[in-house]
Image: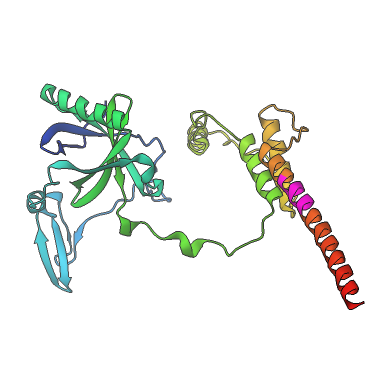
Amino acid sequence: MPRPIWSGSISFGLVTIPIRVTAAAEDHSISFHRIHLADGGRVRNRKVCELEDREVPADEIGKGYEITRGTVVPISDDELDNLPLPTAKAIEIVAFLPAERIDPIRIADGYYLEAANSAANKPYVLLRRALERSSKVAIAKYAWHNRERLGMLRVIGKAIALHALKWDDEVRDPASLAPPPVDLSDEEIEAAIQLMESMDRDDVSDYTDEYTEAVAALIEAKREGVEPPHPAREEQPAQVVDLMDALRNSVEKARTSRGEDATVHKMPERQKKTAAKRTTKKAAQKTTKKTAKKTAKKASGRQSRRSA
């Protein structure tokens, strides 16, 4: 079990739940050292005082805020830990709302919350059961690593998880990134939906990190003194200019990769409905035109009789 990264409590109204926090995810990526290419020696960063021009040990290093050039206010860890904030030692729940109200773009790192002792078990389970029954998530504030954060508490299995959330001013507005209006036909949209349906999956558990596996194979080959594996040469597909052709070819490729019959091109139900609507609309337009012609003809006849 990973070591807790923070200890404190959940503040739920007047209820206090002592908890320990552990990371919910693990990083399995391969990391590298920086080396001197000439001899393989490690290249390290050294912390040097710019005034004394000497390396400074860790116990002599602290924090400081630069107000003006040359004017720095030192701030100690104890002073930061003792700020008069209710969230300094607790994850303070401030609201409850449906999970779908949280935009996924705001969700950051995830953590598991564990009851810190036997006395915390009952209020912990109480909060978990209340979240389950209400089908809501809790919004909380907490202070870690010298900054206050916003978070979301939700139930995963029998545990309560905490997801860090971005503040409103930390999320960029994507409006400027959107392309200008373009013309799309219903047929193109339905073809894209058909491609999506051909790529349906129940979950993402069958995907693997191929990059990390390739790096591990490269390291092992170099350690053994053998030729590193080379990527298989893949034929570059011909450039498809027509969007509909690209969509159809993509659907066939997706179906073939799943062992399905790629030659079957059934019209999706949505496309059938769209086609039916078009037919109905055209028929209605024809009927309207015929009626208009008859009306105009009758009106012309009446006008002629009056003139006579």
Residue positioned 11% across, 47% down in the render = 86
Residue 48 lies, with reference to residue 4, above or below; the image says: below
Q: Is residue 234 visible?
A: no
Query: Where is residue 275 drawn, in percent x and y?
Result: 73, 45
Residue 49 lies, with reference to residue 284, above or below; the image says: below
In front of the other: 90 or 131: 131
Q: Residue furthest bottom?
A: 307
Judge left or right: residue 308 versus residue 177.
Answer: right
Residue 180 painted magenta: no
Q: What colour scheme does the image use? A: rainbow
Quadrant location of residue 295?
Answer: bottom right
Residue positioned 84% across, 62% down in the render = 293
Residue positioned 52% across, 32% down in the render = 207
Q: Is residue 202 visible?
A: yes
Query: Where is residue 114 drawn, in percent x and y?
Result: 21, 29
In front of the other: 183 or 195: 183
Judge left or right: residue 17 versus residue 238.
Answer: left
In front of the other: 114 or 180: 180
Query: Which quadrant, please, contains the N terminus?
Result: top left
Residue 279 painted magenta: yes
Query: Where is residue 301 drawn, in percent x and y?
Result: 89, 68
Q: Which residues are magenta?
A: 277-284
Chief SS of the magenta region: helix
Query: Where is residue 55 drawn, in percent x and y?
Result: 18, 57
Quadrant location of residue 130?
Answer: top left
